[in-house]
Amino acid sequence: MQLKQLVNISAALAAASCALLGQQAQAGTVLDDWQFNSAILLYNETDRVSAAEGVFTARGDFGDDKFLNLGLVVDALTGASATGAVAQPYVQSFTRPSGRGSYDVAAGDTPLDDTFHDTRVQLDASWEQPLAPNWRVSGGGHVSKEYDYLSLGLNGSVARDFNQKNTTVSLGLAYSHDTISPEGGIASAFAPMLLRRDFADDDSYQAAFAATRDRADDTKDTLDVLLGLTQVINRDWLMQFNYSLSVADGYMTDPFKLVSVVNSNGVVQQNLYESRPDKRTKHSLFWQNKLHLSGTFLDASYRYMWDDWELSSHTADVKWRLPMGEQWYVEPQFRYYQQSAAEFYLPFLQQDEPIPQFASADYRIGKMSAYTLGAKFGTKLAAGNELSFRIAMYQQTPENDGVVAPGVLAGVELYEKVTAVMAQVSYSF
Amino acid sequence: MKPTKILSGTLLVLMFAQLSACSSLGVKPWERDMLAKDEMALNNAPLDNRLDDHIYFSKEGSSGGRSFAGGGCGCN
């Protein structure tokens, strides 16, 4: 009843506004002011994670340089993820993060938790408009929800043009508040991973498992500041410099990751839940160039990032768009990434050494290099619509940061490469 | 002097000469034909960048640079 009334009211309002504007009530007239972008990405790692991600964005032109941006992202992950525990020359058993059930890892294999799956939905919106001549402002927010994770965020930015709009200086601020409620709760720092088979009955196992849990959920607050400078160099060259600062405070441990404790012969004695600091300050410098080179378009960027976890990284990214005839283009893409290890990254802990304050064996914060090689093919369709396909290969090569592997660990792979293939289809209309 | 040193020195001199030659960087409003093209926009493939940022955020120890670095998902 209420819904019907609402529909009637909106129909009446729509008719009235159309009459006022002297326009016909046609969907086309409204949609003409909107630009839609959509994309579907499939990501598949060999023997590990598979993901599908769909993005849909809409940009509404409200006249006088005012725009409303809306976004929807849905992604689904499934597959196996490295736990951080080391491979052994014999079969190993692990308890699932929930504490219910276990799985075995074959001799010589990097331990992967194959119960990894999640679905995420994100909604975001932002509004941008001029504030005064040469000034623009924007403000927005996001909500992102996963089974065990919720992120809420707000952001705003202000930009000022100088020098006949050849120079733009901008300042952006973003704040997000995240809550994580992992399956099975949050383990205490370095709590041991218990195995059901070591207990006489379910009750004693459940009681011991519960004792390793500290709390059901935790939070993380992140404040980002982004300072930007955009400069037109000449008719064919545009450049951007960004400095960004990101200060995070809260739970940054991965609740599913383990660190193995090994004896002098490299044999695992115990697996402990990892522990990371609850503060992290990241800085990055980003430099991007857009160049028009005799009918082709080059996008080349470089980023240097460093933080107080002592992780620093270099990222170089090049995309070169080559028009093929009137409608088509092909764009080879290459990205190279290299990072140093966080100071508390350790591939394993030694039994005869004291447990450090923080430790993580997550290869994603270890020493690593990675590259992505891909190509995008696109075509312009009627009415300014565009269809494109992108395919890329991504390979991560974790590296040993000077750690000597004792005993049996010398005979297993501790730094396994990860190879992924990405395929994407995009349509803009 | 090594040839590479001479080459990089020459390149540097050329770059500075290039920069100082234009007393003010930039173009006149009627020279924006190429810069106005979609291909020349800094973020001309926003969805590609968005998807890439999400993947690399989940798989590497760095994030941000082009845009904000923080929050958003539990994938890291």
Image (tube, rainbow, N blue to C red):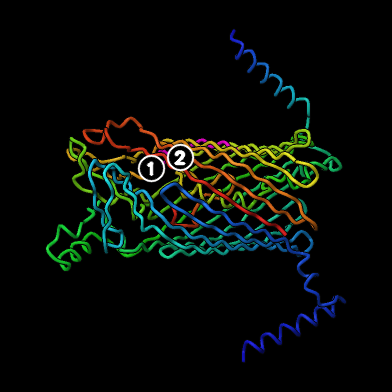
Verify CB contact (< 8 Å) between mark 1 and mark 2: yes
Q: Is residue A65 visible?
A: yes
Percent x, y for residue A425? 63, 54
Q: Is residue A247 above or below residue A404?
A: below
Label 2 Cα crowd, 10 Å radius (few <14 / some 14-19 / many 20+): many
Q: Amino acid at mark 2?
A: Gln
Q: Is residue A399 above or below residue B18?
A: below
Q: Residue furthest bottom?
A: A1
Asked which secondary structure carries label 2, the reply is: strand
Q: Residue at x 78, y 53 (%)?
A: A133
**Position of residue A47 in the picture relative to residue A12 (left or right):** left
Q: Is residue A291 above or below residue A113?
A: above
The residue carrying mark 2 is A396
Q: Residue at x 41, y 39 (%)?
A: A417
Task: Specify the segment rendered in magenta.
Answer: A308-317
Q: Is residue A354 visible?
A: no
**The C terminus of chain A: image quadrant:** bottom right
Query: Would residue A411 be counted in the magenta stretch?
Result: no
> What's the distance in space between the residues labelled 1 and 2, CA to CA?
10 Å
